[in-house]
Amino acid sequence: MPTPPSLVIAVDGPAASGKGTVARALAARFGLPHMDTGMLYRAVALSLLRWGGDPDSEFAALRACDAIGSLIDDAELRSETVGGVASRISAYPAVRQALLERQQEFAGQPDGAVLDGRDIGTVIAPGATAKLFVTASPEVRAERRVAELQARGMPVHYPDVLLDIRARDERDSHRSAAPLKQAADALLLDTSMLDREAAVAEAIRLVEARLAAV
Ligand SMILES: Nc1ncnc2c1ncn2[C@@H]1O[C@H](COP(=O)(O)OP(=O)(O)O)[C@@H](O)[C@H]1O
Ligand SMILES: Nc1ccn([C@@H]2O[C@H](COP(=O)(O)OP(=O)(O)O)[C@@H](O)[C@H]2O)c(=O)n1
């Protein structure tokens, strides 16, 4: 099937829903660059934690945005502590604004791009060719996150991770700046009952169906 000259795919969804897995597979399938935008917010959180800044201060969080360049490959970015602080500082409009241009530039590359996050289809790339909203039940997501962190050698406890996922859902969905929500034109992909392979196959099918319709 011929693909349009610029193909922008927006993948949004809650923590550990599988959006990164789906986004990476879509990028490989369509030969596009991929950006995990959550890593930007995690890098701001890690920068703030290392420097000892106060996560309750929007000003401190904004200052932390200046020092994320060297942190983008840091192993600690994936930790739940960093994820929790990322969820808090990502509610600040000044932080979102500081990270906006970099994401929109990435989305504006000539051939297109795949971006995953919370607000790609709603704020970063509202004109994206295809939008997916990837979700799964909180229990399934907590199990996946536990397995992921254990595989990385990080000590974790299922009840704590489930609580953390629920708290993050609550914060991400109810903040006033770019809350997590399904864009009106996004296609829903619930991966609760799908393994990785089935989720990826369904994502490709949904995007191809969307491309056939444009
Ligand atoms: N459909 C799936 N079934 C089982 N495990 C999955 C599935 N999709 C992703 N995973 C695993 O769950 C964890 C979180 O997935 P990831 O794609 O990083 O989610 P997100 O980007 O939404 O946080 C990873 O370890 C990933 O390999
Ligand atoms: N586009 C984005 C991406 C992440 N985030 C925030 O950054 C935090 C970490 O994002 P992430 O995508 O790495 O988190 P996981 O879904 O991998 O747990 C999220 O809880 C969001 O609050 C955001 O606000 N907007």
Image: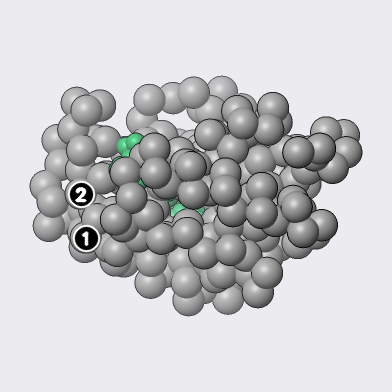
Q: Position of residue 6 (x, y in %)?
A: 84, 41
- Which image quarter: residue 168? bottom left
Q: Residue at the location (41% across, 60% down)?
A: 190
The residue lying toward the viewer, choosing from 113 and 71, is 113
Q: Which mark is residue 147?
A: none
Q: Which residue matches tag 2?
A: 143
**Could you classify mark 1 by the number of other residues whose Cα lies within 10 Å: few (under 14), some (14-19), or many (20 or more)?**
some
Q: Which residue, as the protein is rendered here, is positioned at the far front?
A: 1
Q: Position of residue 30 (x, y in %)?
A: 68, 33
**Could you classify mark 2 by the number of other residues whose Cα lies within 10 Å: few (under 14), some (14-19), or many (20 or more)?**
some
Q: Residue at the location (69% across, 27% down)?
A: 31
User: Looking at the picture, which amino acid does disc 1 mark?
Assistant: Glu
Q: Position of residue 72 (x, y in %)?
A: 53, 28
Task: Tell me: 133 left or right of 193.
Answer: right
Q: Which residue matches tag 1?
A: 139
Q: Secondary structure at mark 1?
A: helix
Q: In the rendered image, which quarter contains the C terminus?
A: bottom right
Q: Secondary structure at mark 2?
A: helix
**Quadrant of the displayed image that contains ligand 1:** top left
- Would you say residue 104 is visible in this rendering? yes
Query: What colouring does the structure picture have?
Result: one colour
Q: Are marks 2 and 1 in contact (CB under 8 Å)?
A: yes
